[in-house]
Amino acid sequence: MALRDPRKLAAMAYDGMGTFELGIVSEVFGLSRPELNVPWYELRVFSLDRAPLRGTGGIRVQAPYGMGVLRSAGTIIVPGWHVDEAPPEALLRRLRAAHAAGARLVSICSGVFVLADTGLLDGKRATTHWRYAERLAARYPRIHVEVDRLYVDEGSILTSAGSAAGIDLCLHIVRRDYGAEVANSVARRIGMAGKLNSWPSRCGNGARRAWRRCWHGRRRIWRGRCGWTTWPGGPRCRRVPSRASSCCRMARRRTSG
């Protein structure tokens, strides 16, 4: 069985969705990038019944495609879901069929609940927003929920933590498909400083510390092998903090890939 082309993306829009998460997908995969000289992704946004949708902030969305695009999509992204609402069985059937045909499934934030309902995450690792982690683990005990990860890559199924972690996961997907150089170019274009092949909190290579803000120097800093430093290329904070220092507020988030 031939694998589907992962560059053919389908992203789900749904009523009451968070527009930020869908915007991440559109920004990373939906824009034309001729400067990269690679065949870029083909993004199609679909909805469950093609009806007008409401997004957060009163935005109205009309998805141009229905669930039929899942028959050919090589990457299917679920950028959120209502955690207390069961996904339609028709959607779950199509996701299972697409995965069996070689498509990879991706979730951002609460979208993992849709993937969990397919049963395809049983026995696998996954992450979600920290607010939903306990609920996910209790509802789906066969899933190994890793709350301290920015994203988890299980090969054909990828999940991210809270909304902004979706940026990390989408850039990770670009890096998987095209390599670090192309992913770095996309990261720079969307204003994500740093290089993915040496950026500790963004590359998915095990336990790393995420971005913190140095309240003393008012610069974003990260701790790499060379210690605390500003990024990119700036001077070190004059007060080099220890792990327990109050100079920097720490966020212990890790990535997995």
Image (tube, rainbow, N blue to C red):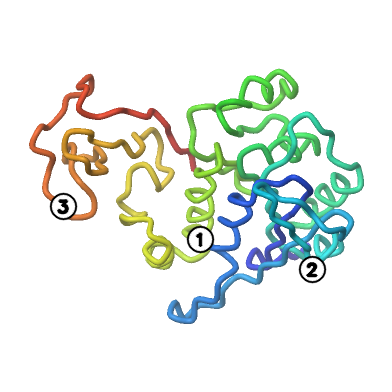
Q: Sequence order check: which comes first, mark 1 or mark 3? A: 1
Residue under label 2: 64
Q: Sequence order check: which comes first, mark 2 or mark 3? A: 2
Q: Residues within 10 Å of mark 2 (few under 14, many from 20)?
A: few
Residue 80, x across and y down, in percent: 68, 43
Q: Nearer the viewer, residue 231 or 142?
A: 231
Residue under label 3: 234
Which SS class for mark 2? loop
Residue found at the very far front of the displayed protein: 58
Residue found at the very far left of the displayed protein: 238
| Spatial separation of the CA atoms under disc 1 and disc 2 | 24 Å
- The residue that appears at 59% across and 57% down in the rendered structure is 23
Residue 251, x across and y down, in percent: 37, 29
Which SS class for mark 3? loop
Residue under label 1: 174
Q: Nearer the viewer, residue 149 or 57?
A: 57
Which SS class for mark 1? helix
| Spatial separation of the CA atoms under disc 2 and disc 3 | 45 Å
Q: Tell me the quarter of the image containing the N terminus.
A: bottom right
